[in-house]
C-alpha cells in the first residue's frame, strides 16, 4: 500500500466530528463528572470513576463515532469512546504506526515474507538470509522490523475496553 493510500485510510478512520452522533450519546443524561478527572483525584477514586464512565460508554450507540472524534483532535482529558487519556494516547500511537507501516512497498513486503520463509521456517541466520535475498543486513533488519510491526498492527486492539457495541 502506498503512503497516500495509508494516509487516506487513517483519514477515513478519523472522520470529522458530527453533531448528529452527539445527540444520541448515552452520557447525555449521565453525571458529567464521571467522565472527567477531579482536581488531585486519588488513583483509587479515578479507577472507580472511570469504571462507571466506561460502563456507560459500553452501552453507548455512538461509541465508535465518539472515539474517532476524540482521536482526531487533541482531547487530552476525560473518557471518550470508552478510553481514558492514556488508552487514547496508546491508540493514537498505534494508528500512527499503522499509517507508517501501511507505506511499506510491495517490494519490501515481499522481501519480508521471503525472509520469514528463510529465517523462521528454514532457520537461516539473518546474514545468510540477507545474502540469499541479495540485500544487506541493515536493509533486511529494517524490512523485518516493519513487517513484524505491520503484522502486529493488523491484529485487533488488545484492550478489554474495546468490546464492540451493537452499532460498531
Ligand atoms: S462513548 Fe461514552 S463518552 Fe462517548 S458519547 Fe458515548 S457515553 Fe459519551
Image (cartoon, rainbow, N blue to C red):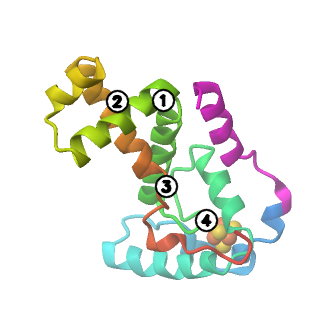
Tell me if residue 117 is in the magenta stretch: no
Q: CA distance from mark 1 to mark 2?
A: 8 Å
The residue indicated by pointer 1 is 104
The residue indicated by pointer 4 is 81
Q: Residues within 10 Å of mark 3 (few under 14, many from 20)?
A: many
Residue 88: mark: 3
Residue at x-position 39% and y-position 76%? 47
- Quadrant where the N terminus lies? top right
Tell me if residue 16 is in the magenta stretch: yes
Nearer-N-terminus badge (3/1):
3
Residue at x-position 67% and y-position 52%? 69
The response on whether ligand 1 sits within 8 Å of label 4 is yes
Magenta part, dominant SS: helix
Quadrant of the displayed image that contains ligand 1:
bottom right
Residue at x-position 47% and y-position 66%? 37
Residue placed most toward the observer, 109 or 161? 109
Q: CA distance from mark 3 to mark 2?
A: 28 Å
Whether residue 105 appears in this view of the structure is no
The response on whether ligand 1 sits within 8 Å of label 2 is no
Residue placed most toward the observer, 87 or 168? 168
Q: CA distance from mark 1 to mark 4?
A: 30 Å
Residue at x-position 55% and y-position 77%? 53
Contact between marks 1 and 2 (CB within 8 A): the answer is: yes
Q: CA distance from mark 3 to mark 1?
A: 25 Å
- The magenta-colored residue range is 1-20
Q: Secondary structure at mark 3?
A: helix
Amino acid at each position: 500500500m502506498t503512503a497516500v493510500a495509508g494516509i487516506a485510510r487513517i483519514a477515513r478512520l478519523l472522520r470529522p466530528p458530527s453533531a448528529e452522533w452527539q445527540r444520541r450519546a448515552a452520557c447525555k443524561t449521565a453525571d458529567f463528572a464521571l467522565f472527567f478527572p477531579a482536581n488531585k483525584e486519588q488513583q483509587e477514586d479515578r479507577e472507580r470513576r472511570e469504571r462507571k464512565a466506561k460502563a456507560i460508554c459500553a452501552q453507548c450507540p455512538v461509541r465508535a463515532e465518539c472515539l474517532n472524534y476524540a482521536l482526531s483532535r487533541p482531547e487530552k482529558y476525560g473518557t471518550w469512546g470508552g478510553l481514558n487519556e492514556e488508552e487514547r494516547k496508546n491508540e493514537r500511537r498505534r494508528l500512527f504506526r499503522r499509517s507508517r507501516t501501511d507505506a511499506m512497498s510491495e517490494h519490501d513486503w515481499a522481501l519480508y515474507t521471503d525472509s520469514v520463509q528463510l529465517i523462521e521456517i528454514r532457520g537461516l541466520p539473518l546474514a545468510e538470509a540477507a545474502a540469499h535475498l541479495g540485500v544487506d543486513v541493515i536493509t533486511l533488519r529494517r524490512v523485518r522490523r516493519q513487517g513484524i510491526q505491520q503484522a502486529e498492527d493488523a491484529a485487533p486492539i488488545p484492550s478489554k475496553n474495546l468490546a464492540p457495541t451493537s452499532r460498531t
